[in-house]
Image: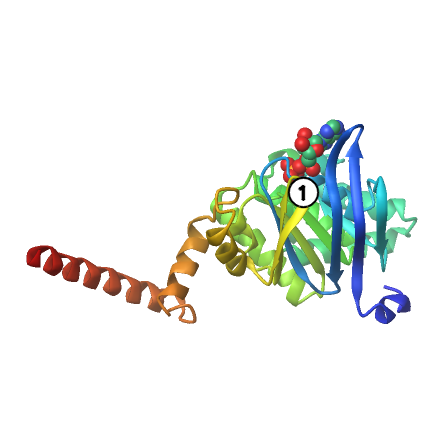
């Protein structure tokens, strides 16, 4: 990252008045969005709302039809909806080496980057594996390692969890948090499920190519949905659970304690419900 970044109050991406049209179809409409260095930004919206288009614009793959995109540090890595489409080689280490090779690094530097990025993504043992035998979760890890090997400071993940089972998904979400907090990466996580964005410290809601709401987290956005556009994005069970805990005043407890409190609370409601019914 260059010194210019520091002068920009640590914004890594700034979008101002961004419009984007595919031929005559306007997919993005007047997007203003600043991404802070070190942010964990979530972007949520239903299918067709323009999320992938926005990811491409932020990654510099598409240019806006009108409006401006500024990136500071110029080092954006994109992990796509189907990360297996990003795999270019048969063996994991060759795949990860592909990017750094194109940067013109020497053999030792490339080897170092491959080893380091596999270590960060937590799968050094996959180095010699054939990519064809990897699970969905492992493919995502390799795709991340590929972006880390390119030294990406900003990582955009576009629906990368769609092919994963819930265990692989929670591992990936933990990993994103780790990249954000321990490796100082700026994370932009795009999903049509608000649940996936629980760890985000800022969430924007996209609909029909427009940012309709900005919130400081998934729970705050959920409150907004309850009041207004709830039909568009449904929270998953995890977020509903957290929101319920919060309403019950149990939000700060650890999950075991809170679950215990909830079960007792529900038992109490059932009992008092019966009492009331008897009365009537
Ligand atoms: N290559 C394309 N040509 C024409 N229209 C497109 C193209 N890609 C996407 N669109 C349209 O743009 C809108 C936004 O698409 P997209 O950014 O993929 O949304 P999302 O990722 O939220 O599902 C959709 O209506 C989609 O049909
Ligand atoms: Mg998409």
**Residue 29, above or below 240:** above
Q: Residue at x 16, y 58 (%)?
A: 273
Please state the horizontal and vertical placement of residue 181, each as a whole percent of the image.
65, 67
Ligand 1: quadrant of the figure: top right
Q: Residue at x 74, y 59 (%)?
A: 35
Please state the horizontal and vertical placement of residue 184, each as a whole percent of the image.
71, 66
Q: Nearer the viewer, residue 16 or 61?
A: 16
Left or right side of 250 for 40: right
Left or right side of 48 for 240: left
Please state the horizontal and vertical placement of residue 149, each as a whole percent of the image.
78, 52
* Tally of numbered discs: 1
Element marked by disc 1: helix
**Residue 23, above or below 244:** above
Left or right side of 168 for 213: right
Please state the horizontal and vertical placement of residue 219, each as a whole percent of the image.
50, 59
**Residue 229, above or below 73:** above
**Colour style of the rendered protein structure:** rainbow
According to the picture, the residue beneath numbered tag 1 turns out to be: 51
Q: The C terminus lies in which quarter of the figure? A: bottom left
Q: Is residue 186 visible?
A: yes
Crowding at dot 1, Cα within 10 Å, few <14 / some 14-19 / many 20+, comes out as many
**Residue 39, above or below 135:** below
The residue carrying mark 1 has its beta carbon less than 8 Å from ligand 1: yes
Please tell me in which quadrant of the rendered image residue 151 appears: bottom right
Q: Nearer the viewer, residue 227 or 51?
A: 227
Q: Is residue 130 visible?
A: no
Furthest-top residue in view?
23
Q: The N terminus lies in which quarter of the figure? A: bottom right
């Amino acid at each position: 990252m260059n010194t210019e970044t520091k002068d920009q109050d640590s914004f890594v991406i700034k979008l101002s008045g961004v419009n984007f049209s595919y031929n005559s179809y306007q997919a993005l409409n007047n997007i203003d969005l600043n991404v802070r260095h070190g942010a964990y930004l979530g972007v949520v919206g239903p299918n067709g709302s323009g999320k992938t288009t926005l990811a491409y614009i932020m990654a510099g793959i598409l240019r806006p039809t009108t409006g401006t995109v500024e990136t500071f540090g110029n080092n954006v890595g994109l992990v796509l909806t189907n990360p297996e489409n990003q795999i270019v080689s048969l063996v994991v280490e060759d795949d990860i080496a592909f990017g750094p090779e194109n940067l013109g690094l020497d053999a030792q530097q490339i080897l170092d980057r491959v080893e380091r990025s596999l270590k960060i993504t937590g799968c050094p043992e996959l180095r010699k594996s054939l990519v064809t035998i990897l699970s969905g979760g492992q493919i995502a890890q390799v795709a991340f390692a590929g972006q880390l090997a390119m030294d990406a400071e900003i990582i955009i993940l576009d629906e990368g969890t769609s092919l994963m089972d819930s265990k692989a998904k929670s591992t990936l979400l933990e990993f994103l948090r780790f990249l954000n907090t321990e490796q100082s990466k700026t994370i932009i996580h795009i999903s049509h499920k608000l649940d996936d964005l629980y760890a985000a410290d800022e969430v924007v809601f996209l609909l029909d190519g427009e940012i309709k709401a900005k919130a400081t987290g998934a729970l705050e956005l959920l409150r907004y949905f309850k009041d207004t556009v709830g039909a568009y994005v449904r929270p998953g069970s995890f977020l509903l659970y957290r929101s319920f805990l919060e309403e019950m005043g149990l939000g700060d407890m650890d999950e075991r304690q809170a679950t215990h409190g909830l079960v007792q609370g529900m038992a109490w409601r059932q009992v008092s419900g019966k009492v009331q019914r008897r009365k009537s």
